Amino acid sequence: MALAVALGAAGSHVLSAKLTENSLRLFTLGVNYQIYHALGLLAIGMIFDQYPNRKTVISGWLMFVGIIGFSGGLYFYALTLSEWVRSIIPVGGLLLISSWLVLILAIFTKPTKTYD
C-alpha cells in the first residue's frame, strides 16, 4: 500500500510532465489497482483468521503475483512503452480475478488444516 501511495505521488508530481496523457492514465490505473488489491490482501489476511484453509493462502499468493503482473506491468509499460510487457498485463489481471474467485471458494470450504 505504501508503495502504491509513493508511486501515485511520483506519478502526479514528477511523471505527469514527462509522460504522455495515455501513459499517465495507464500509470494511474496501475496505482489504483495496486491500492484496491493491497486492501484485498489485508482482507484475505483477516478472512484467513476465520477460514484457515489452503485456498485462502492460494488466494493471497494469486493476488500478490497478480498485483506485480498487472500493476507492475502497467508501470513498466507506461514508463518504457516496451511492447513485450503488454502480454504480461492481462495475465496479471487474470491472476487478480482468480484470486477473488479462489477466496470465495475458500470462504465456503470447511477448514482442513489449522495454520497456527
Image (tube, rainbow, N blue to C red):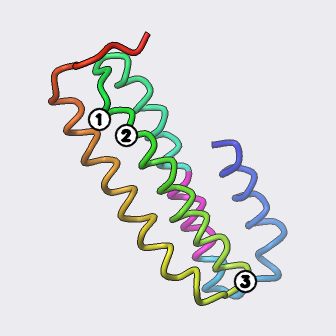
What is the span of residues highlighted in magenta in the rendered image? 26-34
Question: Residues under labels 2 and 3: Cα distance?
Answer: 32 Å
Q: Which residue is mark 3?
A: 80
Which is more toward the observer, 4 or 67? 67
Please report the residue visible at 48 percent of the width from the left and 81 percent of the height from the top. Answer: 87
* Disc 1 from disc 2: Cα separation: 5 Å
- Amino acid type shown at disc 3: Thr
* Sequence order check, earlier mark of 2 and 3: 2
Dot 2 corresponds to which residue? 58
Q: Which residue in the structure is indicated by mark 1?
A: 55
Work out whether residue 8 or residue 70 is closer to the camera in this orientation and state it.
70
Name which of mark 3 and mark 1 comes first in the sequence.
Answer: 1
**Badge nearest the viewer, 2 or 3:** 2
The C terminus appears in which quarter of the rendering?
top left
Residue drawn at point x = 37 percent, y = 40 percent: 58
* Quadrant in which residue 2 is drawn: top right
User: Which SS class for mark 2?
Assistant: helix
Quadrant housing residue 97? bottom left
Q: Tell me the kind of residue under disc 1.
A: Lys
Distance of label 3 from label 1 (alpha carbons): 36 Å
Where does residue 5 sit, x and y in percent of width and height? 69, 49
Describe the element under mark 3 as helix, strand or loop.
Answer: helix
Q: Are marks 2 and 3 in contact (CB under 8 Å)?
A: no
On the picture, is 104 further left or further right than 71? Answer: left
Callouts 1 and 2 close, C-beta under 8 Å: yes
- Residue at (72, 58) in percent of width and height: 7
Q: Position of residue 59 (x, y in %)?
A: 36, 41
